[in-house]
């Protein structure tokens, strides 16, 4: 291969376009998808954004799918063939792959209307609810994993005293050697208190987030014990299983077990009133709040925040990694949380995420179910039409009011200014680097995966490898700011993953056999592999580079690129010095420029053969440049080889 690789993708695109354009029934009136989309774009004068891959995609009966009166119908017809869809992104039509957990409010409306036909009264509803509980448990697979779980004594830290409340860290073993770590916020005053289990979502800084500390501490000041805990693969859990483990279906099961285990523990405490038990979390924490309330009837109140919708199940595998929404022929989070009826339930929603539909759709649906019990006033909705997806002050206030009312908390203590925000480290049970972790503690996701179907987690293992690479490369920069380091590491990890995923989804066989127009040779496997990989959307590269350049100095950016390309720039430049001993400063500048360009291109390829091939292209450029600069590359190279051979011979002779 070597030369002109990057031109092939273009050339091939044209070949496919020409061959697919057989406008007869024998050719199924096929046309390349990319071309059809471009036509829809100009015909209807609309803007398309691509989050899909159109390379090598050919659409049969293409023109027949276009409806001259509707861009939307045309797009739906065209995209459906490939399991793609569009969503509105401002004025633009964003083309996306089918997403099983995300539907539209229109779909949610139809689904709720359908569900409403299934139960006309309390008895019918309760029969459905009972089935749902059983099937959700089954589909989640939680009982299989619970069989492996252990019950050992919780590891509790010293109690830290603050204004009107205390905080104590807890680590609780679930699967053997696997811990859920959290903090218990308790009222300073003695007595029997309600308990609120607080799963958290995917906000930056996890449960250590200031908003979440304010929520837990204020509720504790007001009289409730709040227990928050790390998501699986976040916070201290990351020290045990790595961050990549979070994006697995195991996360959804283990997080549910974590919540239930912490509730079990809470109910062993003498200061807890078992008749007042709640769950509260925002975003992904809201999805967990719903699931916990389905799994355990000990919850007597719940408050999911910026989470609940009939048309979105949560996009993370920790929310929708197991097919619980298929229970009883199809359900959704609105129906699942309705099982709280007639117990107090608060839904907090806002105008700028998927919960915008709550006042019109989900809330009236819930009111109907609560009405079966004559308890319509027990379900409430705090909607913030002008706010977005967060757990900000107004939403926290709604939650304080709800629990003050439901659990008889002390409103006089509702004052966030009295709360002390603690450092991350203060909330760790096992120390910053896990140095205090007990003997036998799990140190890799593989040890957890062993309890599940192992085949499920091949991807997770590969992710873990890439994550390790990203962490090590970032660590080599010795950045002082932990947040910058974490951001850089995430950028690299995401890029490595996207390169791998693209590579795996576009094997060389997707590129037809053909010839290299520069040499006339048949395309090799490597050629075809590189053509397929070179079609990866440019955004993947740009996102990494602009992100790195925002956070790092140019020198540090170069260090990262060198990690990707195993120091090939320096190595190759050294080679030029060996072959051209009198290389001028000007020549070095030009050559270095080419090699740096090679390096930046090469990072988007998955394996070393490909990376070397990219460098070959630029080495040719360097050699052409030297020739044009009055050098004779062939001669120089020959002299170099001769000299090396002579040296070897001499060395061998000396040995004898
Ligand atoms: Zn998640």
Image: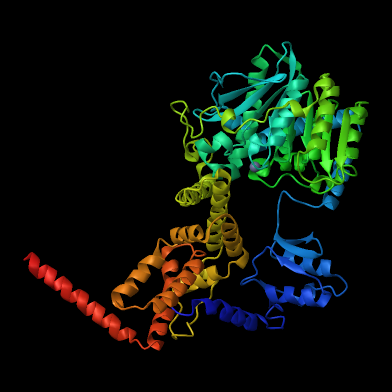
- Quarter-wise, where is residue 213 in the image? top right
Q: What is the residue that sits farthest to the front in this orientation?
A: 585
Percent from the top left, x then y, of residue 75? Answer: 78, 68
Give the side of residue 309 with respect to residue 543, left or right: right
Rendered position, 66 above or below 121:
below
Give the side of residue 37 with respect to residue 583, left or right: right
Rendered position, 126 above or below 512:
above
Answer whether residue 520 is visible to the viewer in this image.
Answer: yes
Name the residue rendered at 47%, 49% in the picture: 465
The residue closer to the viewer here, 141 or 561, is 561
**Ligand number 1: quarter of image:** top right
Percent from the top left, x then y, of residue 46? Answer: 81, 71
Name the residue rendered at 36%, 89% in the picture: 630
The residue closer to the viewer here, 58 or 198, is 198
Name the residue rendered at 45%, 86% in the picture: 520
Image quadrant containing the N terminus: bottom left
- Quarter-wise, where is residue 643 in the image? bottom left
Coloring applied to the structure: rainbow
Give the side of residue 95 with respect to residue 16, left or right: right
Give the side of residue 602 with respect to residue 93, left or right: left
Image quadrant containing the C terminus: bottom left
Name the residue rendered at 78%, 70% in the picture: 47
The mark total stands at 0
């Amino acid at each position: 291969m070597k030369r002109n690789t990057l031109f092939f993708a273009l050339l091939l695109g044209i070949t496919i376009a020409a061959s697919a354009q057989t406008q007869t029934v024998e050719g199924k009136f096929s046309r390349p998808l990319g071309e059809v989309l471009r036509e829809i774009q100009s015909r209807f004068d609309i803007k398309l954004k691509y989050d899909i891959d159109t390379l090598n995609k050919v659409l049969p009966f293409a023109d027949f799918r276009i409806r001259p009166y509707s861009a939307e119908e045309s797009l739906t017809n065209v995209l459906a063939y490939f399991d793609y869809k569009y969503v509105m992104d401002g004025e633009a039509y964003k083309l996306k792959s089918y997403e099983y957990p995300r539907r539209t409010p229109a779909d949610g409306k139809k689904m709720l209307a359908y569900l409403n036909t299934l139960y006309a009264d309390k008895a019918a509803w309760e029969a459905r609810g009972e089935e749902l509980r059983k099937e959700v448990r089954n589909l989640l697979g939680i009982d299989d994993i619970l069989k492996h779980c252990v019950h050992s004594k919780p590891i509790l830290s010293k109690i830290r005293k603050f204004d009107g409340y205390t905080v104590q860290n807890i680590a609780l073993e679930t699967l053997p050697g696997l811990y859920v770590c959290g903090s218990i916020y308790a009222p300073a005053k003695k007595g029997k208190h309600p308990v609120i289990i607080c799963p958290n979502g995917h906000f930056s800084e996890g449960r250590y987030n200031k908003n979440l500390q304010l929520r837990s501490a204020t509720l504790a000041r007001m009289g409730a014990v709040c227990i928050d805990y790390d998501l699986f693969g976040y916070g201290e859990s990351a020290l045990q299983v790595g961050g990549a483990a979070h994006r697995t279906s195991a996360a959804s099961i283990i997080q549910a077990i974590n919540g239930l285990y912490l509730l079990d523990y809470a109910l062993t405490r003498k200061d807890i009133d078992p008749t007042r038990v709640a769950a509260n979390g925002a975003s992904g924490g809201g999805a967990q709040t719903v699931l916990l309330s389905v799994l355990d009837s000990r919850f007597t109140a719940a408050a999911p925040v910026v989470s609940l919708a009939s048309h979105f199940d949560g996009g993370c595998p920790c929310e929708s990694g197991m097919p619980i929404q298929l229970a009883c022929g199809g359900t959704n989070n609105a129906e699942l949380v309705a099982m709280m009826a007639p117990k107090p339930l608060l839904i907090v929603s806002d105008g700028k995420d998927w919960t915008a539909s709550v006042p019109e759709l989900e809330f009236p649906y819930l009111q109907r179910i609560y009405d079966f019990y004559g308890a319509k006033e027990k379900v409430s909705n705090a909607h913030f039409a002008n706010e977005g997806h967060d757990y900000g002050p107004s939403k926290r206030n709604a939650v304080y009011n709800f629990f003050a009312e439901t659990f008889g908390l002390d409103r006089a203590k509702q004052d966030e200014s009295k709360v002390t925000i603690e450092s991350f480290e203060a909330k760790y049970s096992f120390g910053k680097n896990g140095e205090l972790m007990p003997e036998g503690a799990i140190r890799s996701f593989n040890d957890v995966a062993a309890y599940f179907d192992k085949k499920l987690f091949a991807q997770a293992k590969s992710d873990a490898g890439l994550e390790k690479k990203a962490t090590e490369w970032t660590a080599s920069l010795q950045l002082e700011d932990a947040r910058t380091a974490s951001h850089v590491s995430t950028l690299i990890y995401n890029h490595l993953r996207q390169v791998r995923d693209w590579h795996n989804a576009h094997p060389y066989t997707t590129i037809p056999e053909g010839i290299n127009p520069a040499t006339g040779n048949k395309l090799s496997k490597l050629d075809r592999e590189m053509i397929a990989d070179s079609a990866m959307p440019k955004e993947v590269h740009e996102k990494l580079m602009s992100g790195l350049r925002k956070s790092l100095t140019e020198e540090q950016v170069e260090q990262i690129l060198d990690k990707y390309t195993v120091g090939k720039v320096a190595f190759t430049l050294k080679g030029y010095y060996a072959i051209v001993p009198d290389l001028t400063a000007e020549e070095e500048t030009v050559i270095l420029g080419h090699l740096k360009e090679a390096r930046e291109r090469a990072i988007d390829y998955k394996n070393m053969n490909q990376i070397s091939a990219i460098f070959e292209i630029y080495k040719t450029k360097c050699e052409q440049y030297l020739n044009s600069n009055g050098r004779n590359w062939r001669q120089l190279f020959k002299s170099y080889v001769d000299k090396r051979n002579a040296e070897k011979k001499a060395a061998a002779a000396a040995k004898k």
